[in-house]
Amino acid sequence: WHDEMKDKVGAHLALQEGRPSDAIELFRKHMVRVAAWEAPVVNPENGAKMTREAVLGFNEKRLGDIYIGMDGHAADAGAAYARARDWYQKALADLEPGTIEFKSATDELSRVPVGGQ
């Protein structure tokens, strides 16, 4: 848990310090851990269960947002956004409509730009 928090906090710090490449690397390390989750974790903000797929979608969108702010990385942003949409679609396929988890994934998916926009 400490390693996961260290990477996430380090990534946010890197963003604040204007080191987007370091932030991307640290968020990717976090995503490797998320990909290994065997069960959802509970979001402490709203009590919703966060599935591996939804969290990976969230982080791919985050990477797209970082890339879009970097000169010469529009294609990387577009690829990250495409992966985010794919992850959210996988999450939605396994979630029950009408649940907070389904609504959250749907809302997050609606925020993912199409292409590198």
Image: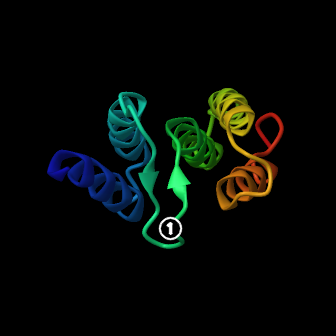
Q: Is residue 99 left or right of residue 10?
A: right
Q: Does 99 appear above or below 92?
A: below
Numbered circles on residues, count: 1
Estimate the x, y position of residue 102 in percent, counting from the top left: 72, 51
Neighbor class of circle 1 (other Cα within 10 Å; few <14, some 14-19, many 20+) is few
**From the viewer's perspective, is residue 32 above or below residue 100?**
above
Residue that appears at 79% across and 45% down: 113
For the C terminus, the quadrant is top right
Q: What residue appears at the point 83 percent right and 38 percent down from the top-left corner?
A: 114
- Which residue position is annotated with label 1? 47
SS for tag 1? loop
* Residue 27 coordinates in the image, percent (x, y): 39, 42
List the single residue furthest toward the bottom. Answer: 45
- Name the side, left or right, on which 48 lies relative to 108: left
Percent x, y of residue 89? 74, 33
* Frontmost residue, 24 versus 56: 56
Quarter of the image for residue 32 reads: top left
53, 63: nearer the viewer = 53
